[in-house]
Amino acid sequence: MPEGRLPAPFEAWFASRGWAPRPHQLELLGIVGEGRSALLVAPTGAGKTLAGFLPSLVALSKRAPSRKARGLHTLYISPLKALAVDIARNLEAPIAEMGLPIRVETRTGDTPSHKRTRQIERPPDILLTTPEQLALLIAHREASELFATLSCVVLDELHALVTSKRGDLLSLGLARLHRLSPKLTAIGLSATVREPDDLRRYLVPQGSMTLPPLRGRVPAEQAGEG
């Protein structure tokens, strides 16, 4: 499988933390860089959330600064609104420390109505939300314009989403997103599961796309910071 190359600012950021990019993080970066979807199965602490956002952060860091080229780039979907808020807070650190021109916001049931309206009119680069909020967004009269620039959707704790009743709701939302943004890349993040192929099929429209696996699963001994 291809491995992506981190730009110098990202390599410097990892080094400043005393970290090195993990093989699965670079591999996912390479796969998504080729416009393909992927499922990353890894234990807690293996850096899978950062791996899921690296392709978007790298792509956004290279984007032309013209406002006309801006729009919603990445949609992150979490089973818990508290998790979405925590992940957004964690994303602010690398974005600020590398000086990246990236705006991150959350949209949950607790988001004030005026902020929700602004997110439609002037969407952030990365929006973190839940399946229920996605259902409301795709039903919005301006959904076509909102998702026209969408490049990537990240589904965290995918095993928890798919196996619950919310999984059907989310599958309808994903199908709509793929219609609104045909070149959309989907990234699934999950803890260890028995049947990863079920999750892989969930990520993309069947019969029109192929989903490459990552090279094996991340072993537990690779777990740690990063």
Image (spheres, rainbow, N blue to C red):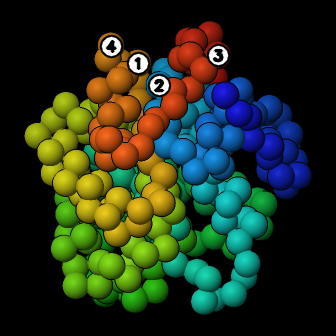
Residue 223 shows in the view: no
The relative height of residue 76 versus residue 223 in the rendered view (above or below) is: below
Q: In terms of sequence position, does the residue under pointer 3 or pointer 4 come before the other?
A: 4
Which element type, helix, strand or loop, lies under badge 4? loop
* Residue that label 4 marks: 194
Q: Nearer the viewer, residue 153 or 192?
A: 153
Of mark 1 and mark 3, the one earlier in the sequence is 1
Q: Between disc 4 and disc 2, whose residue precedes? A: 2
Residue at image location 51% in from the left, 31% down from the top: 212
Measured from the top left, where is residue 104 in percent x and y?
Answer: 53, 67
User: Residue at left 70%, top 56%?
Assistant: 58
Q: Position of residue 182 (x, y in %)?
A: 41, 62
* Residue where numbered disc 1 is placed: 192
Q: CA distance from mark 3 to mark 4?
A: 20 Å
In the rendered structure, are the residues bearing label 4 and label 1 in contact, judged by CB atoms less than 8 Å apart?
Answer: no
Task: Check disc 4: other Cα within 10 Å, few if <14, some if 14-19, many if 20+.
Answer: few
Task: Answer above or below: position of 77 versus 209.
Answer: below
Q: Which residue is mark 3?
A: 222
Q: Are marks 2 and 1 in contact (CB under 8 Å)?
A: yes
Place of residue 204 in the rendered image (x, y in percent of width and height, measured from the top left): 36, 44
Extreme left residue here?
A: 165
Judge the density around disc 1: few (<14), some (14-19), many (≥20) Cα neighbours within 10 Å.
some
Instruction: Check disc 2 and give the amino acid type.
Output: Val
Identity, as a three-letter code, of the amino acid under mark 3: Gln
Q: Secondary structure at mark 3?
A: helix
Number of residues whose C-alpha sits closer than 10 Å to that of mark 3, classed few (under 14), some (14–19) or many (20 or more):
some
The Cα atoms of the two marked residues, 1 and 3, are separated by 14 Å
Residue at the disc numbered 2: 41
